[in-house]
Image (cartoon, helix red, strand yellow):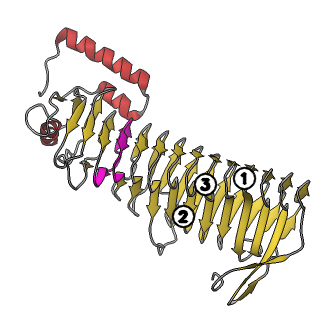
Amino acid sequence: MKHLNLGTFGVASLLILAAVLAGRNNSPAAAALKLAGVDFVVSAAGDAGPGTLRDAILAADRLTNRARISIRVKRIAIESALPALVNPHGVMIDADAGYGLIDASHQIKGAVLQINSPSSALHGISIVNAHDFGIVMNASAVELDGVNISNSKVGIFLGAAAKGSAIRTSVFEHDDTAITAEGGVRDVSILSSIFRNNNKAGFWFVGGIEKDGDTQERIRIIDSVFEKNASGVVLANRPVLIQRCRFMANAQSAVLVLGGAARVEDSEIQGSVGTAISVSTGRQVTLARNTLTGNLVTAIMVRDSQVTIDHNTLTGNGAGIVSIASSNADGTVIRDNIISKTVTDAITVIGGSPRLQHNQATDNHGAGLRTLNLVSEGGEIKATPVLEANVFKGNGTDQPPPAVYKLAGTLPR
């Protein structure tokens, strides 16, 4: 239905609806929805025909101005991909609580919804059972707010064109991968969202080494929760900021960095079954002011990387901080950390020369500091950490004599 004549009663109802939406969400997307008029109402639950979501999107794409679609049915079963949003002025799709569930069980392949329209917005919709992608974002300044995607292969794919987009207060559960991104994407924010029980990862951003060595952060993940995923966040050569997030009981790593730059700050990480934060061949990685508690294996492990581990608090982990083959004192810096009640060693240096400054390792069951020369078939890397004003007190042993760690195969380059 296009350009409804609401009348006095309809205008009053719309104002009430706007007030409710404003109370529920103060994001830019919600504010825009509050001001926009309804162009099309989805009132039919079928896959196609009058009053369906498919029909509304086709009509919205033909408008010469910004369009708004309001979903007022509880469940929509689709059999093929919905039309892409292509209106150059933007399309807004919203649903109130309890409405707007899109079931893609019968859609064999392809994205449920592709957004090619800049400045589009989705609010309150849910997608389940997508065999490929729930949502593909291929346009700039797109806002997703209160979106739920579950039981899908990939919840959201961020294309390179999704610059300046934001995902807010959304929930991703029981997907293979909740969100993944193309290498060229920039300036995307993921805010106050929940990633739970995803089979591969909550967020996956992996690519080859880039020639320009860019360290500018592409994506910001802030105030979000990662719980019981296989891995929380997996990164390779794609700079990302993780800030004020909570990671709980992830099966492998909470954060896995396989090269390139990253920052993990002011976050809480607990109950990881594997290594909580693992960094290999990272460059310009910062781990600062995080709290790591009760992680079963190792709280922080870095290997052959340039990492600053600064002002973190580690309590009751299997092992504290492990540095492997840090080539020089400028490579890995471990400073001002507080480490206590670790089951094994507080700080372990396996080959290399990391700089240890002003750390406090107290009441750990193993060593406060353990140094191990790294030996393999190809030779030996001695453990020669640079020590400055550290405190090792009340541990099982504070600083045992150097020993040897034997590595099968050749040494890392």
- Taking the magenta stretch, the answer to whether it contains residue 407 is no
Residue 389 position, x and y percent, is 89, 60
Observer-nearest of 403 and 52: 403
Which one is in front in this view, the residue at disc 2 or the one at disc 3? 3
Q: Specify whether 354 is left or right of 231.
A: right
SS label for mark 2: loop
The mark that comes first in sequence, 2 or 1, is 2
Q: Is residue 295 above or below residue 7?
A: below
Residue 250 position, x and y percent, is 55, 51
SS label for mark 3: loop
The mark that comes first in sequence, 3 or 1, is 3
Q: Categorize mark 1 by other alpha carbons within 10 Å: few (<14), some (14-19), many (20+).
A: many
SS label for mark 1: loop
State the extent of the magenta-drawn residues as a range: 131-154
Observer-nearest of 56 and 64: 56
Separation of marks 2 and 1 at Cα, in angstroms: 31 Å
Task: Say what amino acid the circle numbered 2 marks.
Answer: Thr
Observer-nearest of 77 and 164: 77
The residue at which mark 2 appears reads as: 215
Task: Say what amino acid the circle numbered 1 marks.
Answer: Asn
Q: Categorize mark 2 by other alpha carbons within 10 Å: few (<14), some (14-19), many (20+).
A: some
- Taking the magenta stretch, the answer to whether it contains residue 152 is yes
What label does residue 317 carry, if any?
A: 1
Residue 24 position, x and y percent, is 42, 24
Separation of marks 3 and 1 at Cα, in angstroms: 11 Å
The residue at which mark 3 appears reads as: 273
